[in-house]
Image (cartoon, rainbow, N blue to C red):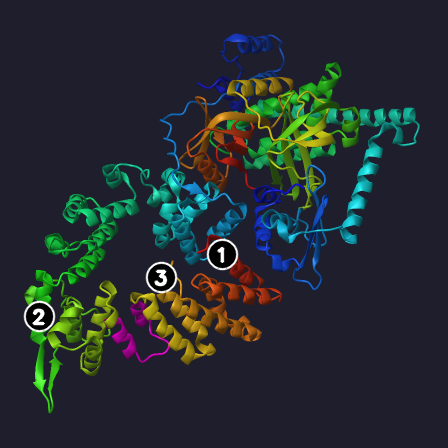
Amino acid sequence: MTIIAAEAVLALAPDAASANAARALVMPARWPVLGANDVAVWGACQGSGSKPYQTQIGIAGTTPVFRCSCPSRKFPCKHALALLLLRAKQEELFTQTDAPAWVSEWLSTRAEKDRKKEEKQRPETASPVDPEVAEQRDLKRQAQRWNRIEGAATELEAWLYDQIGRGLGTLGDEQLGGWHTMAARMVDAQAPGLALRVREAAQGIRRGTDWPERLLHRIGLLYLLCAAIRRRAGLSPEMQAELRTVAGWPYEKSEVLSTGKRLADQWTVLGQIREENEDHLTERRVWLHGKSSGRRALLLEHAFAGKGFEHSWLNGSTVEATLAYFPGTSMLRALVAEVTASAQTQWPDSTLSAEWQTVAQRVASSPWVRSHPMVLSAAIPLRAGDHAFLMVEDQIMALHLGDGDTWRLLAHSGGHPLTMMGEWDGLALRPLSAWGFDGLWQRSPE
Amino acid sequence: MSTWAALLSVAMVGTERQVPVVPGLDGAIGDLLAELAVLGDPPAQWVLQMAAVLATCAQAGVQGTAWPGPVPAAAAREVLTTVDHTSLIVLLAWTLRDGPQRLQHLVFRSLASQGCRLPIDLLPLALEQGRRSVALRESLQPVLGERGVWLAGQNPAWNYAFGVAAAAAEEVCWTEGSLAQRRALLREERRRNPSAARERLTRLLGDLPGRERAELIGELATGLSMDDEALLDSLRKDRSREVKQVTLGLLLRLPDCAHVQRAQQRMQALLWQERGLLRKHWRLDAPSAVADEWKADGIEATRPTHDVLGERAWWLFQLARQVPLAWWDRYTGMNPGDLVKWAAASDWADALLRAWREVLAVEPEVAWCEALLDHSPKTPFADHDMTLLACLPLARRERYWEKQLKDGGRSRLRVLVHQLLQACPAGECLSASLSLAIVSAVAEAVGQHADFSNDYALRAALPELCCVLQGAALGQMLAVSDEAAGKPALPELWHTVRQIIATRQALNC
């Protein structure tokens, strides 16, 4: 049976507070019931209430699944993390036995759900509605939405002409309202992707000394997006799909799973990051690397108000799986269609020139990709003043990294080279993981 | 000039006021921009088209920049082994983040004694703790390993720990090492060759700040002899108060030095014997004036306004603290116990007892400490008694605690625990018997649940107390916490207690 190491358990924590709270619960006295078998680990944790919380973790799959009767909205909650930590530290405390009813019922419910999900994904179990009618209805709906998006793009394009006509130098706080109004109009037209880019451009106005150059860069790409949407009909289906996604009209997961390009490989989890926006929406980006194909993939998921994600991924773990890529030209975002087995961890290797080449090719296929995964071998983290950098070969890249993580990264490196995975945003690298002689470094949960 | 400059100029002013021009770029990008110019689109659209081209190409062609300076040298190869047991690493992380400083001391010393260094993931946290607490630095330094020392060199706030590689040559260590490394080197050289070490220190003294001077001069205590008198005599006039204090402490250990001889002569002049009915009695008078030459020996004529001593008592106090305690035994023929009783009965009790306590702080002598403590009427002890207790060896010190525990009962437990911790230096533990006695008293206090919950002082001291208990007492305290952990109150406290005990048991410290 797999026992997850303590560091890996803590990497599953939704935030640093949960990790700390979990550490405080790693006390056998707080767990009057502890048990395990080949498919699950469970325990009853004495909390502040009269009845202990029932915590259970499914460990049969390649990634653990959690459930707890506590009221926490964090996922996994501190009890689940503490249970795994306790398992990592003191395996002997867990009695090998048959699962109690509250565990076995949950496991069977999960198995049932998984079965239904699989059935749903099969084409023969699709909706009983006449496929031709449904397709016609779907095409009509799509055409309507495209019309709205094209209208929005045309309006935005004209508005951008006005901004350039009047000059960006006239922009100040009083003009920001107009930018936000334009963003709201994009949302109304069901093009939230356009709205996001307008808002981001607005946020950069008069911020930093090089704001004019950055703003022109952003609105140049925004113009390109509008122009491409205007000329959509003449573009390839892949580019049309890309434009649709960038405009903020994502594909349904079921559609991706049924029609997306599939790729079976041994996928290694390179790194992951969770970010919460002001609307309490948590975005998780998990980056994978395929051993045979050399392809990278992004598993992008969202959860609201601290709710957890269905699957947990451990950095450095490798699985044999089939991914289904979202349609488009960037070919990064994917879904896990099927996991076959766990495999031995295989960290990839790469050269800087190959990584830059991949970035260039991806930009050529879609200039709107916001984060490029990069694997940088023989990288040395450095710090100068209050800023962190990465030296790779003879080049320096700025790092987006908080103080605590920077010092931990420097401690891991000690001035020696290591291999780093991060997200390149065009200006700086956001490190997510690094591995070298002294083991794995991981970015702290946000 | 940036490739954006030409475009930015018109974009900032606006195409309504300025006509765009094609940025002068060579190659395919320049050709593409030139092609856009001939399309004849409106100026604003043309500018946006050019911006789209430049933005896309900039993203596609971006590369890193060159590093302006030399790359810092990498950390040297580690000599020490590291902790690799996951559960121990988790405990160490807790110790550094949430544990009491006393536990951190214990952990560092234990790791050092086992030839281990801290795990690299914990180094930033450990260095940060060292930045906040000067007292922690000495025990932290040996467990930083080469990586920790290297890391300290990357952050000016951690410079206190930045030295040279452990295997560095002596001269490199002396000129480039951290203060702790220089102190260790000086101490070692004093053992081997005291005069060479003194000369090494003398050469460097003028360049050092006061605190460093004081700490390095303190190392002269190893191998101290009359050969050091000249240097110490010159340091009595140092501009740093800390240096003067350390110097006077060292001179007190040289009874034959001129400074001490002068102090003894001055004190001798104030003492005389008076014939009583059965035997002679010693009498003492305070100076009635400050002689001019006294000032050269640091005697201040003006009494500080806040001081409780009167003017003459102040002068007497200053004279008495320059005289070694052994002189009093020798000159008066009385033992420390009798001397303390004699001083307490005199008109100048406050000045004399205070001076003796100060001398004891720099030159501890068990008999004198015990004499002063036995004389102390207060239960629990006053603060200055705590300082005296701290000067006693642990075994001698504990009989006072045991007596107080017996006399004071549970009601005074919190004061006793607090004072006991004060007098017990970081890294030291109580004897097994006293540890067990205290745990029993704590268990009794915890049993009175409401009382214990309201006794904030005792609750707050409990984590630190767990750092000074020994052996079986730790197990008993664990049982107390197990019982208490089942109750809903104070879960954080009992968690902390358990973590401390788990850490100590894991490291056997």
**Dot 1 and dot 3 residues touching (CB under 8 Å):** no
Return the chain for callout 2: B
- At a point 21% along the width and 67% down the height, the residue shown is B359
Disc marking residue B425 = 3
Q: CA distance from mark 2 to mark 1?
A: 56 Å
Left or right, A328 with respect to B368, comes to right
Location of residue B484 with respect to B45 vertically, above or below: below
The residue nearer to you, when weighing B296 against B361, is: B361
**Amino acid type shown at disc 2:** Arg
Tell me the mark number nearer the camera, choosing from 2 and 1.
1
Disc marking residue B140 = none
**Dot 2 and dot 1 residues touching (CB under 8 Å):** no
- At a point 62% along the width and 37% down the height, the residue shown is A314
**Amino acid type shown at disc 1:** Gln
Which element type, helix, strand or loop, lies under badge 3?
loop
The residue wearing badge 2 is: B266
Residue B437 spot, x, y in % from top left: 45, 72
**What secondary structure characterizes most of the magenta part?**
helix
